[in-house]
Image (tube, rainbow, N blue to C red):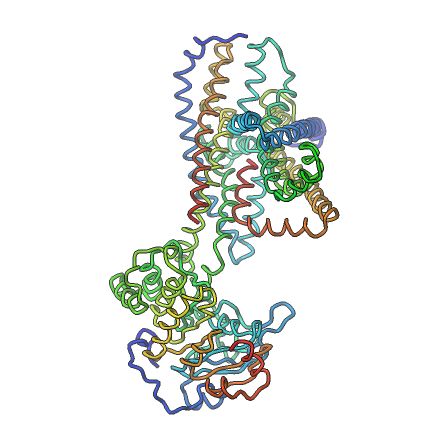
Amino acid sequence: MMTSGMFTNYFLPGIWITVQVTVYSALLAAAVAFLVGTLRTSRLWIVRFLAGCYFEIFRGMSALVFMFFLVFSLPLMLRWQLVPMWAGVLALGLTYGAYGSEIVRGALAAVPVAQREAGVALGFSRSQRLRRVEIPQAWPEMVPPFNNLLIELLKGTALVSVIMVSDVTFAANLVRFANNESAPVYTLLLVVYFAMAFVLTRGMRLLERRAKAGVGQEQPRGGLLRRGLHEDAGEGAGALTAGGAAR
Amino acid sequence: MNWDWDVVGDYMPRFWDGVQLTLQALVLGSLIAFGLGLVWAIAQRSPYRWVRWPVSAVTEFIRSTPLLVQLFFLFYVVPEWGPSMSPLTTGIVGLGLHYSTYTAEVYRAGIGGVPQGQWEAATALSLPRVRTWLAVILPQAIRRVVPALGNYVIAMLKDSPMIAIIGALDMFGEARSFSNETFTSEAYVVVGVAFVVIAYPASVLIRLLERRLVLTS
Amino acid sequence: MSSPADTPEIPPTVTDPPEPAVVTAAESRAAGTELVRFDKVTKRFGGTTVLDQLDFSVAAGKHVTLIGPSGSGKTTILRLLMTLLRPDEGTIRVDGALLTHEERNGRLVKAGDRHVREVRKKIGMVFQQFNLFPNMRVLRNVMEAPVHVLGLSKDEAEQRARDLIELVGLSEQLDKYPSQLSGGQQQRVAIARALAMRPQVLLLDEVTSALDPELVAGVLDVLRDIAHSTDITMLCVTHEMTFARDISDAVLMFDKGKIVESGPPDKIFSDPEESRTREFLSTVL
């Protein structure tokens, strides 16, 4: 039988590891997403091409296979061993960052050309334009798909259990081995993941509201209007590509 | 740098066996995902709350929890009171079930994108509900969701190595057992390259399809 | 009672004495010819009352045009008749049968789907946006409902569809998809599609509003033809006043969910009694 001791002794530490892996790989993924995403809008074709290659390779790559490559192939080839948890974080961050770069690129492309031109007219440099004009305006567009991606990432963290990181899935497997009762263990495990996803979604919704309000305050009319139009035009197709890109 | 092409050569026969199994899982999993997703999507438009509500709850739950854990559940828990399935069958059912909750959203958007006037015209002609769905709504909805469904097939391909964890010998499963037997690691690289090589042309194809659809609609 | 399937074949019979097409409920019941009747129908959207305790009826074979400023509830009447909307209060009868209600143990209750569908078959509708099925060729658009609703054989339905498509002048376009046709052609197919069900009442909802100006005449000619050569009852919402004058037996002027004025077209257009009618006509004529 499941006992409370089992939960506190195995599940809780596991949940803590899962949270850590999620946070670290989300940070890495966000950094990769913004870097690669903005590079994919670069004026230099070679930069666009290389960033595009990164996107295509990691979009096609299975995170699980990449994890095994990092843990088993890399040490043999380079004689350099990664701690399993960091191998997991690296694999998740790099692959989910690739999806994220598509979100960043799409949102930047949706910023009206006039805004870019206004930035040029004001004498901003390219990086100033990105930081002060384009990214702040694209941000509210990014938050909802980032939410989807974060849930996908949370689900993806279960993979680290396979490379011996003692996350909550690993803990559940241990418990199952120990007392051979799989039904309560895996049911509880599913509920734990669902609860974490629920909390994340709530948090992201708060962020979404604040992001929208932020744009509204900075430019009350134009900002809101632009969003409204965008939603109307892209209702069907937008939802679909967002779903597709979020994977 | 340690790299042995002979190891790669030794692995290749088993790699091809694995590719076959991966593709088999992918095709059958996709069929389940396409069919079941449509069922979810239509059920969520039911006029009855007692149909809509449980379907939404179940699909939301499946979508928010890891496929890997669902595979464990199907493989270790379900046989306690239900059918006992081989690793491959479990994997196919798991992939199909998991992705059906995504295709359901795709269908939902596609169905929602069919103009209200089409429903009204069907009402004005008194078309029965089943006929309205089969002859009017679905042909229009499915046409525009094909690229999105294709994207999920690619996503499913990338998640397919998870079925190796419960013991299926797909291309990753073959790589794992080969590497464990021979204390080598080249096989993982081969499989990694294989994923990119399969996924890239597929995604190019889907983008072409998307563009054609935009042009014709 | 004539069966809906026979209607278009009956030779033109609208030669009755010039009795008013729109008469009070009591009068028309006595005459026994009313085909559509609204009894104290109220429809609200949120807080706004679009139709307010509306009473009116249309005699069989008559052509009635509804005019009035936008938002006056004209289109709502057609949509209620087509059961795309349900009334909040009041009842609608079509050919004597209650449309969205049923009488059970002497009490009025909401009708089941089957009842609604049965009564609805007497009504056809042509929409502002055509609403052809884009995934079907012209011929199949027209055949679909006769085959799957009326249960006609494929051959019968095809013959009927071909005749109607010829009637609207599109025999050359049988195998095209709607997207390959002009707006005017699409609307003519939509008219053929509605007629293929042999409805007793044809509802026309601003059928030329979405058309480029040069395509309007072709559609109106087809409708004039149908109005003059069949005894089908028509309820028409339009901004084409010349057309309304040509085909109507009666015109109803609406404002704010109520009938302001009704009468034969000559009277309404040339010598309206109400100031609101005059105002409205001065803006559209």
Residue C74: x and y in percent read 52, 74
Quarter placement of the N terminus of chain B: top right
Residue C167: x and y in percent read 30, 69
* Image quarter of residue C152: bottom left
| Whether residue C25 can be seen here | no
Between C10 and A56, which is closer to the camera in this rendering? A56
Q: Is residue A51 left or right of residue B201?
A: right
Residue at the image position 71 percent from the left and 46 percent from the top:
A215
Residue C58: x and y in percent read 45, 82
* Image quarter of residue A111: top right
Vertical position of residue C11 compared to residue A26: above or below: below
Vertical position of residue C87 compared to residue A233: above or below: below
Residue at the image position 46 percent from the left and 35 percent from the top:
B153
Q: Is residue A99 left or right of residue B143?
A: right
| Marker count (numbered) | 0
| Whether residue C153 can be seen here | yes
Between B55 and C82, which is closer to the camera in this rendering? C82
Q: Residue furthest right?
A: A217
Between A160 and A231, which is closer to the camera in this rendering? A231
Residue at the image position 57 percent from the left and 33 percent from the top:
A99
Vertical position of residue C68 compared to residue A3: above or below: below
Vertical position of residue A115 compared to residue C9: above or below: above
Q: Is residue C265 left or right of residue A229?
A: left
Residue A236: x and y in percent read 52, 49
Between B37 and A144, which is closer to the camera in this rendering? A144
